[in-house]
Image (cartoon, rainbow, N blue to C red):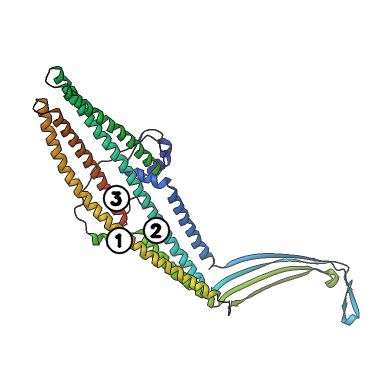
Amino acid sequence: MKKILSLLLIAIAPGLFGQTNKLTLEESVKLGLQNNKMIQIAESKYRSSGAKVTEAVSNMLPRLSVGGIYNYMSFQNPDALPLFGGLAKIPLDKPLSLYGGSVTLQQPLFTGLKMWSVKSATENSMKAEEKNLSAEKNKIAVEVNKAFWNYFKSKKLKALLEENLKAAENHLRVTKNFLDNGMATQNDYLKMEVQVQKIKLKLVDAENKEKITRSIFNQTIGLKINAETEIETNENFTRIEELNYDRLVSEALRNRDELLAANFMLNAGDDMITAARSGWLPSLYAVGNYYMYNMDAEAIFGETQRIRLWTLGLSLNWNLWDWWNASSKTVQAKEAKFQIEKQSELTKDKVEIEVFSNYLSLISGQKKVDINELTLKSAEENYRLLENKYNNQAATSADLIDAQTELMKAEMELQISKIDFELAKVELYASVGRKLYTIK
């Protein structure tokens, strides 16, 4: 029941998202997978590979065929059929006709392992397409994750600026009160007003950034770019306590769909080499026929003749010389497998580099979060002290502005580092072959 409700949500979501909606990361990934055209192409390739398997199996099964014939003959010359050396003649003044049908059953017995090899090759190709589909889904899931977290980042940065704007406007009111009571100078008031305007300007840029990241997010999950989409997350940025590069690489080499697909294609390459070599071997079929003919030749036989017969036998065919056709196909199959092997090696090298790069990025990202948390604590304490001092006329407006600027910078850098750390986890998990989407 839960699965049915989930599918129903995905089906009706595009129509509902003309209004403001809140999407979790999991819901966003589901929509992205459902609407992505590259995944639809990959799914089509997988379905096509399944049809090729069915085609290969059908070639191994008995084939039943029917046929029909009708011939009409009208004699112009001679006008009679001589018999017994011309002693007698049968007139041919009436036309002759032959009509009937046949049924043929044919079963391949031995084709030099060609049919079995082609069947095995198509099965391996289908498994490879299944892994390619999985890899494409994970790729799109990564893109949705990036779009989701970048949208979330822009929303958080805008919210932080809004909070800082409220604090700056409060400082401006306090400074105005001080100015009215002769406790502050006009210069202090102007500095505070400039600070408010600077934050407002940054807020305009942040609002534009939020709109841009939201439009990218909408496009990534298959919605209209101007949809008023909202997102929600629990913001639980978990730390990674232990990372071992060697274990991560081993996991990637075991689990990456691209490498698994390459292994299946290598197996298919071996099968196609066997199929190509089958051209040097004979083919043997069992064949059965049943014929039914009517011959309308009254001028010769005096009545319509009915012919019924059946045959059962073996058909053997062996190409003794084919002008290097079989050898050429074998060379092509070997070279195709060689290309797959080298492409697999390149993919393996690429995977190892991806894992290493993402491993370093995650370690670096976690250190940045730790440093920015400490920086924020220091900036909060410094701002708290200077705000109290300023309210008691023990600090200047410039000191308070500097403290607020440092606090705002520390808050933003911490949010950015946390979200970048989350994205680094996504990149690392994807590079080691972990699924970032719900497997159906």
Residue 418 in the image: state x and y as whole percent. Answer: 23, 44
Dot 3 lies on which element? helix
Q: Disc 2 versus disc 1: distance between alpha carbons?
A: 19 Å
Dot 1 lies on which element? helix
Label disc, if present, on residue 426 of the rendered structure: 3
Which image quadrant: the N terminus? top left
Q: Nearer the viewer, mark 1 or mark 3?
A: 1
What amino acid is found at the position of numbered circle 2 in the picture? Lys
Question: Residue 222 occupies which quadrant of the picture?
Answer: top left
Tell me the residue at 26%/44% (across/down): 419
Tell me the residue at 42%/61% (across/down): 128
Residue 408 in the image: state x and y as whole percent. Answer: 20, 36
Residue 291 in the image: state x and y as whole percent. Answer: 69, 70
Label disc, if present, on residue 195 of the rendered structure: none
Dot 2 lies on which element? helix
Question: Residue 32 occupies which quadrant of the picture?
Answer: top left
Q: Is residue 77 above or below residue 377?
A: below
First in sequence: mark 2 vs mark 1: 2
Tell me the residue at 19%/26% (across/down): 192
Q: Nearer the viewer, mark 2 or mark 1?
A: 1
Please name whichever residue, 298 or 393, is drawn nearer the observer in this view of the structure.
393
What amino acid is found at the position of numbered circle 3 in the picture? Val
**Residue furthest toward the front?**
187
Q: Which residue is mark 2?
A: 131
Q: Which residue is mark 1?
A: 352
